[in-house]
Amino acid sequence: MADEAELRRLYDAHANALYAYLLNLTRNESDSHDILQDVFCHVARRHDFVANAREERAFLLRMAYNAFVDSTRRRHAREHREQSFAQESVGLFEQAAHADEAVFRKELEAAMAELPVEQRSVVHLRLWEELTFDEIATLMQIPPDTAASRYRYGIDKLRDRLRHLYDEIR
């Protein structure tokens, strides 16, 4: 059982990043909270898992990803669920100070929602968590080339989807 102070430290240090990652995967606040709670309940029961990890954040992100996959597998209509995740707007970004920035954030959020979950996951981990493809590959248990390909395809789709904004400001 994890010591309460250590569990609090882990939560304070990593919960926001894990929640943002899960929200990007699930596209649902409630599901993200549930999965995050499952991750930290698991950590509380088996603190040695995290204590023996080389990098806490990467290990916890991997736990979050695995918990997400497990959660998704338990649902009867996985494909239907992923489609509904992708269409929900969940406010990934903070409020923008300027109208143009707000429009861009809204468009980026919508574009991210249109990506397949595998690409969305890699793009999030690369851009917001600043993980390398090797780290992403380890976290998602895929080859590094697959992580790089998913990122490239995701970025290409985002670029195509957001090109009209770029053309508008030129």
Image: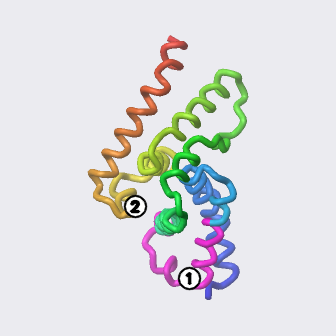
Residue 39: percent from the left, percent from the top? 58, 71
Magenta stretch prevailing secondary structure:
helix
**Residues in magenta?**
35-58
- SS state under label 1: helix
Q: Which residue is mark 2?
A: 140
Q: Please say if 27 is above or below 63.
A: above
Comparing labels 1 and 2, the label whose residue is closer to the camera: 2
Residue 141 within the magenta-colored segment of the rendering: no
Q: Which residue is mark 1?
A: 47
Query: Residue at (58%, 78%) from the top-left corner?
Result: 42
Residue 87: percent from the left, percent from the top? 58, 41
Q: Residue furthest front?
A: 76
| Mark 1 touches mark 2? (CB < 8 Å) | no
Query: Residue at (54%, 41%) from the top-left corner?
Result: 113
Residue 112: percent from the left, percent from the top? 52, 39
Q: Nearer the viewer, residue 124 or 29?
A: 29
Does residue 123 appear to the left or right of 46 in the view shown? left
In which quarter of the view is residue 142 placed?
Answer: bottom left
Position of the N terminus by quadrant: bottom right
- SS state under label 2: helix
Q: Please say if 84 is above or below 98.
A: below
Kind of residue at badge 2: Met
Query: Residue at (30%, 51%) from the top-left corner?
Result: 146
For disc 2, the neighbor class at 10 Å (few under 14, some 14 to 19, many from 20) is: many
